[in-house]
Amino acid sequence: MTQLQALIIDVDGTLADTERDGHRIAFNKAFAEAGLDWDWNVARYGELLKVTGGKERIRQYLSEDHPAILEQAGIDDRIRELHAAKTRHYVALLETGAIPLRPGVRRLLDEAEAEGLRLAIATTTTPENVTALLEATLGKEGPSRFEVIAAGDVVPAKKPAPDIFSHALNAMDLPAKACLALEDSDNGVRSARGAGLEVVVTTNDYTRDQDFAGAMAVLDGLGEVDSPACVLSGPALPGAVLDIATLRDWFARA
Ligand code: XBP
Ligand code: MG
């Protein structure tokens, strides 16, 4: 039996609830700044989340709502510019401290390090967004707590393709059977499973009703002592929170 050696963790929706009040706001600011009347409300953004990656998401929106614009000359550059502006707005928003880590995340990271587990990130979002979130929530040393940060366009195919998790595994020189992925979405589960990883899901408002087939366990969060986690599918939790001992136990049984 292979022991658990590393956690490979998603960012958006898993480490922090970044989508509704973070990325969405930043997209809308970029659109307004460019003089566009596009406005992604909470529900519409939820639909667009089926496509991961900001540039890919803008393209998807245009294909559905403004197909003629997608045919215009120079549209690829236009999308890249809009997305660069979105990243600027998003990083500025994170720097205000507006987006905290999800409950239990800091605790689990501290425990993982104390127990000698290696940590990595696998996300579709832009690298500077990851740095900004980790610095804003964990301090200047936050990013260096992860030995690998696999992010954004470093791979050509974003989640649900397995590439980003495979990239993180290669960078850590670890086999999938020694690692566990933490995710929040169906696209993330498909990506991690495609790379051969076991996955534990913590859901959020946007992902609660998705299909997490293949996940080892699905919970509504990591839980804290005063607000216990609820298991939606998978083995029962021995206590109020998901901790490293429980993850090790589930991993050994999977
Ligand atoms: C997260 C995403 C990201 C962000 C936007 O997916 O889909 O695209 O919404 O990031 P996951 P960028 O959590 O599955 O990795 O705009 O920087 O691309
Ligand atoms: Mg996610």
Image: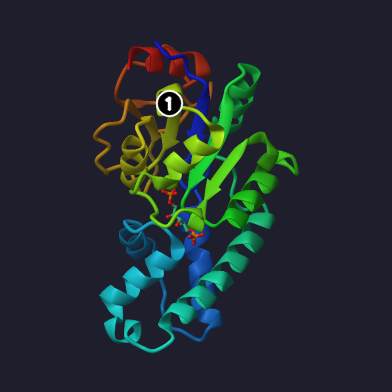
As drawn, which residue projects farthest toward the bottom?
A: 73
SS at mark 1 in the image: loop
Please tell me which residue is depicted at 27% across the width and 44% down the height of the picture. Answer: 210
183 horizontally vs 143: left or right: left
Q: Is residue 80 positioned above or below 154 on the image?
A: below
Please tell me which residue is depicted at 43% across the width and 32% down the height of the picture. Answer: 181
Please tell me which residue is depicted at 37% across the width and 26% down the height of the picture. Answer: 230
- In this picture the colour scheme is rainbow
Residue position for label 1: 229
In which quadrant of the rendered image does the N terminus lie? top left
104 horizontally vs 93: left or right: left
Q: Is residue 241 positioned above or below 134 on the image?
A: above
Position of residue 18 measured from the top left corner of the image (x, y, whole percent): 51, 52
Queried on whether the Cβ of the residue with tag 1 lies below 8 angstroms from ligand 2, the answer reads: no
Q: Is residue 95 positioned above or below 122 on the image?
A: below
Position of residue 246 measured from the top left corner of the image (x, y, whole percent): 45, 15
The amino acid pointed to by label 1 is: Ala
As drawn, which residue projects farthest toward the right?
A: 140
Position of residue 103 measured from the top left corner of the image (x, y, whole percent): 54, 34
- Report if residue 54 is visible in the image: yes
In which quadrant of the rendered image does the C terminus lie? top left
Tell me if mark 1 has few (under 14), some (14-19) or many (20+) residues whose alpha carbon lies within 10 angstroms of its own: many
Nearer to us in this view, 245 or 169: 169
Please tell me which residue is depicted at 31% across the width and 44% down the height of the picture. Answer: 186
The image quadrant that residue 129 belongs to is: bottom right
Position of residue 69 measured from the top left corner of the image (x, y, whole percent): 34, 85
Nearer to us in this view, 115 or 25: 115
- Report if residue 138 is visible in the image: no
> How many badges with numbers are in the image?
1
